[in-house]
Image (spheres, rainbow, N blue to C red):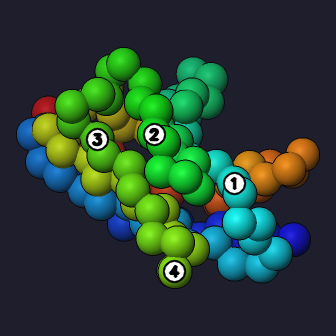
Amino acid sequence: QVQLVESGGGLVQAGGSLRLSCVASGSIFSVNVMGWYRQAPGKQRELVARITSGGSDYYQDSVKGRFTISRDEAKNTVYLQLNSLKPEDTAVYYCNLAQSTMVYWGQGIQVTVSS
């Protein structure tokens, strides 16, 4: 089993920044993909960014150039730096870890961007 615990969300004004962290614990394989998804009210959950254990990353078009995903293997932690935040970035952000055939989710953390 794997547990994911997110932190770092909150309320910020448009143009501001936040840094989300997600610590993974449990049975973690050396090869995996960690990522961040988000779900706004009334919308489906969507992939924001992901990064492999080899360091390859991917971003949704709407966050390219504003968000940066990174990971610290020694700490089993993935980060999401959110810059130039917009009101449309408001959502619950979920940490995700995929390894082998298993997928794990964090409990979610609220990010609210005021205009």
Q: Which mark, residue 75?
A: 4
Q: Secondary structure at mark 3?
A: strand
First reached walking from the N terminus: tag 3 or tag 2: 2
* Residue 5 place in picture, x, y as percent: 59, 71
First reached walking from the N terminus: tag 3 or tag 1: 1
Q: Residue at x 45, y 39 (%)?
A: 57
Front-most of residues 107 and 95:
95
Along the horizontal axis of the image, is 70 left or right of 13? right
- Vertical position of residue 37 compared to residue 107: above or below: above
Front-most of residues 5 and 26:
26
Q: CA distance from mark 3 to mark 1?
A: 21 Å
What amino acid type is highlighted by mark number 2? Asp
Q: How many marks?
A: 4
Residue 38 in sight:
no
* Residue 62 place in picture, x, y as percent: 33, 21
Along the horizontal axis of the image, is 14 left or right of 102? left
Q: Nearer the viewer, mark 3 or mark 1?
A: 1
Which image quarter holds the C terminus? Answer: top left
Q: Residue furthest left?
A: 15
* Residue 15 place in picture, x, y as percent: 9, 40
What amino acid type is highlighted by mark number 1? Asn
Q: What residue did someone put label 2 on?
A: 57
Q: Are marks 3 and 2 in contact (CB under 8 Å)?
A: no
Q: What residue did someone put label 1 on?
A: 32
Q: CA distance from mark 3 to mark 2?
A: 12 Å
* Residue 60 place in picture, x, y as percent: 43, 25
Along the horizontal axis of the image, is 26 left or right of 89? right
Q: CA distance from mark 1 to mark 2?
A: 12 Å
Query: Within 10 Å of the Cα at label 3, are there few (<14), some (14-19), or many (20+) other Cα atoms?
Result: many
Q: Nearer the viewer, mark 3 or mark 2?
A: 2
